[in-house]
Every structure is written in structure tokens, then in C-alpha cells.
Image: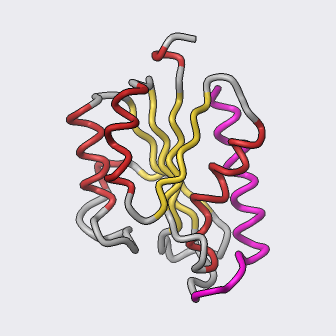
């Protein structure tokens, strides 16, 4: 498979903080499906640590999945225009997601898509809410439709 056929899916989030685990949930699901052309990466809470790995893969597209406050019903998701992501507006992590996106744009220059999902709860040691699990399953289907 040529690198320009590969889509990297970066799941951002903390698996021990309830619905913040949405990004890791999506990439784990994609990993178990083993779909040709999909390269899932669990970036945890430090996506910037994976820029080198993404650069080596040299994908045609990077899809970023993260739990963000969209001010909508829990489990709802949106594909967000990356030009609208500024500073820490959407980030619950130490470095703003916008810096991760800028690094991908500058280092790799591939297409980037950001999918945000509305969390219900972000408490430590909480399980993911049923709403977010269902939303994540819909995101997986959305990504598979892109292949």
C-alpha cells in the first residue's frame, strides 16, 4: 500500500477520565477491525509526542478524534473546521490541539480533519457514558465511510 493511501486516525484523550476516553476508544475499535488503509494511533493526552511517527507514515490524511465541549447533547459529534480551532478553546490537554494541528500542517502538509464529540462526564475513574459510546460507534462508521 502506498503512503498516499493511508489515513492516520489520532485518538486524543485520557482513558481514565470518563468520556475523555472517546478518542482512545475510537482508535482501539479501528485497531481491532484491522482495516487496510487505516492507521490508528492512541495519542493519549500528549498528541505532540506522535508527530514523528505520523511524519514517518506520511499519510494522505490525518483524522483527529477528541472529546470537546461543543455545547450540544452528550454523544453528539461534529466535524470541526480546523481553521476555527484556536488556542485552548477546544482542548482539555496541556498543549492546545491547535499546536498539534499546526505541526502536522507544517511537517507533513496532508489533509486534516478534526472530529469533536461532546462528553457527558470527565471524572477520574468514571466509565464512558452510553451516549458517548454510541457516538464513538457512529464516528467509527463515519471514518470507515471515508476509506
Q: Residue furthest top?
A: 2
Main SS of the magenta segment? helix
Q: State the count of labels.
A: 0
- The answer to which quarter of the image holds residue 35 is top right
User: Is 30 on the left or on the right of 99, as rendered?
Assistant: right
Q: Is residue 96 above or below residue 98?
A: below
Q: Residue at position x 66%, y 59% from top?
A: 25
- The answer to which quarter of the image holds residue 1 is top right
User: Is 30 on the left or on the right of 4, as rendered?
Assistant: right
Residue 125, percent across and down?
64, 86
Residue 30 on the magenta span: no
Q: Is residue 31 above or below residue 46?
A: above
Residue 106, percent across and down?
20, 35
In the image, 118 versus 62, the foreground residue is 62
Q: Residue at position x 37%, y 71% from top?
A: 93
Residue 124, percent across and down?
58, 87
Residue 127 on the magenta span: yes
Q: Is residue 124 above or below residue 1?
A: below
What segment carries the magenta color? 124-147
Amino acid at each position: 500500500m502506498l503512503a498516499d493511501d493511508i489515513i492516520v486516525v489520532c485518538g486524543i484523550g485520557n482513558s481514565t477520565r470518563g468520556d475523555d476516553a472517546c478518542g482512545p476508544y475510537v482508535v482501539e475499535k479501528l485497531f481491532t477491525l484491522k482495516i487496510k488503509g487505516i492507521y490508528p494511533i492512541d495519542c493519549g493526552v500528549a498528541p505532540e509526542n506522535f508527530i514523528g511517527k505520523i511524519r514517518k507514515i506520511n499519510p494522505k490524511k490525518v483524522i483527529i478524534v477528541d472529546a470537546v465541549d461543543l455545547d450540544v447533547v452528550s454523544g453528539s459529534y461534529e466535524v470541526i473546521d480546523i481553521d476555527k480551532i484556536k488556542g485552548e478553546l477546544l482542548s482539555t490537554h496541556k498543549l492546545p490541539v491547535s499546536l498539534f494541528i499546526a505541526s502536522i500542517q507544517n511537517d507533513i502538509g496532508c489533509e486534516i480533519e478534526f472530529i469533536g464529540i461532546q462528553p457527558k462526564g470527565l471524572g477520574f475513574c468514571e466509565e464512558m457514558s452510553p451516549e458517548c459510546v454510541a457516538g464513538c460507534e457512529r464516528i467509527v462508521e463515519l471514518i470507515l465511510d471515508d476509506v
